[in-house]
Amino acid sequence: MKKIIFFICQLLIIFDLFAGQVILSGSNQSTTQGMTVNPYNTNFKSRHVQIIYTANEIIAAGGIEGNITSLTWEVIELTAVPLTNFEIKMGHTSQNDLSSHVNTGSFTTVYNKASFNFATPGYNQIVFQNPFYWNGIDNIVIDVCFGINSTTSNTGYIKIYNSDTPNLMRGVASNSGTLCNVQTSASASGKPVMFLEMNTSSCMPAMNFRIHAVGSISAAAIWTNAWSDVPDSYLFTVYQNPFDQIYYTKTSQNTDIGTTQRIVFESLQPDTQYRAYVQSICGNDTMQLVGPIEFTTTPVLDLPYIQNFEGFYMNDNVLPYGLAYSFVISEKSYWNINQIEPNKAELMFNTTEDEGFAVTRLFTPKLNINRPVKVTFKYSLDWQKMSTGNNTDYIRVELNYTPGYSITTLQSNSYWSNTSVQDLILEKDYYPQYQNTELFFLIQLVGGIHHSVMTVDSISVRPLNQEAEIVSFHLPGQDGEAIIDSENGFILLNVPPPTDLSILVPVMTISEGATISPNPTLPQNFNYPVYYTITAEDTTIVKNWTVYVNGIQSVNDNFSQKLIDFYPNPAGDFLSITALKPVIIKIYDIKGRLVKELYCESHTKIDISNLSSGIYSIKVVSDNNLEEYKFIKK
């Protein structure tokens, strides 16, 4: 912390020393001694170097449109020999880096000298012979060349910064000729700490302006207040593609110096490109635009929507794509990402001071809901009650058409004292009234709170299951696997003697979320067909199932004695039937078509070799009695 304070103070002192100068500096500072890409070093007799500074960088340092009349470098060591034919040119460019050489044909020559060197180490100013007019919009390239010197000497270096960022400088060096008309070819990950004497504004810009969260209908921006001369407010302007007119404006009042601030752009359209700018306002003085920051809102998504933060890696503390938030009461409450492992992060809601009531909403993308859904929100909470008042605090989850218009709501229990709870789940089914309903999932922490943290484990909106299936079925003593005919709702299986079929409890699996009647844990009499009704999770499908054991069950439970016995089941080419008295036997396929009919007095063997594999019904008629059985043709 002391080092940070010292560096800030040092910058402020330098700013006072060079009044009217813009300080272009940053972290990861080092020197450039001996580097090929070096505007001040005599390791080679000739050099040609280009350095880029972005408009946003200059504006963030307080620079505004107008003439640039000098530059200042921090010289760490002087060169042992003077630089021959030393020349500086400046020009505008749309390039954001020096991954390629910038053409200097339209550049302004601001300084040249046949023999050049600095007098002493330290901060050294080069006063331009011709000023360079900056338009306040484009990036700036500074082009430096010299040579050919009389000799070489590995001396001369200046302070650079951002040594971990590629393509900030670009150069070429040689001992055999002049290079001012030769394109640069080698890049470096740093550029000089530099002060430009130019027009400045006392109204400091927003620093590190960036988009923090982008959803379907809103986006949150984040920035840092200046370390001095904090503006009275910031004006944000948002343009929608094709960017020819203002779509949205919002003003944010400022707070303490050096603090992180947030603002939400609302009433946006899904799957749309936007550009955001910010201006600082200090009384009657308005700073020029900083930006643009470009972003595209999330399109309307199809279900399921699941976000569990597994495998998510935090990038500049930006929320995952599609998650956005808005402030209802206090802008000092906010959502952030906390990286807990390389492959796992947590979504956290924070309040940092006593705020009375704080409500900050978290939004998922808009969702295309054309069927019933299940809403699930898993979270933990470390909550501290305010010292006064009896405010009720709770977590609320909603499905909404528009912010503030709740379609369905579920909420946690109220918390009345300091509380730390883990692994809570809020869950509810929602049945849309209309087809293709566009909704979003909203979370709120409501109440009088102080230093509270809610950690989100997962967010889910998934369709309710529309299946009403018996996936597996098993009885005690069962021989082989049960045959499940989902199309017709039949289950056939064999349980050989001596198992008592009258009091068996099945073990079965049904579709996820479905319900069953009667209770499958109760014993049933499987001497006769047993009927189950399965209702799908979304309640739109109700399906009747019949379980046949050994294929020898009557549809009439009043029979005390069966009219026939038959075997085997499943059968191959023949089916043997024993009748207790003369009967008429009719065999039907699964579609109800009669495939065989015969008369049997006591015993017969039926050739079924010409029948296709599948499930068949046997209807037995004797006098006024009717029995029905099922068998399987292999």
Image (cartoon, grey):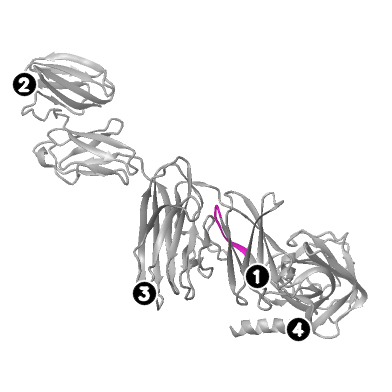
Quarter-wise, where is residue 536 in the image? Answer: top left
Q: Which residue is mark 2?
A: 580
**Residues at marks 4 and 2, CA–CA distance in whole angstroms:** 116 Å
> In the image, is 100 to the left or to the right of 345?
right
Q: Which residue is mark 1?
A: 233
Q: Nearer the viewer, residue 336 or 27?
A: 336
**Residues at marks 1 and 3, CA–CA distance in whole angstroms:** 36 Å
| Residue type of the residue flagged with mark 2 | Leu
Q: Residues within 10 Å of mark 2 (few under 14, many from 20)?
A: some
Q: Which residues are magenta?
A: 210-217
Q: Which residue is mark 4?
A: 16
Residue at 14% x, 40% y is 524
Q: Which residue is mark 3?
A: 418
Q: Nearer the viewer, residue 260 or 521?
A: 260
Observer-side mark, 2 or 1, equals 1
Q: Name above or below for residue 419 compared with residue 560.
A: below
Residue at 59% x, 69% y is 261
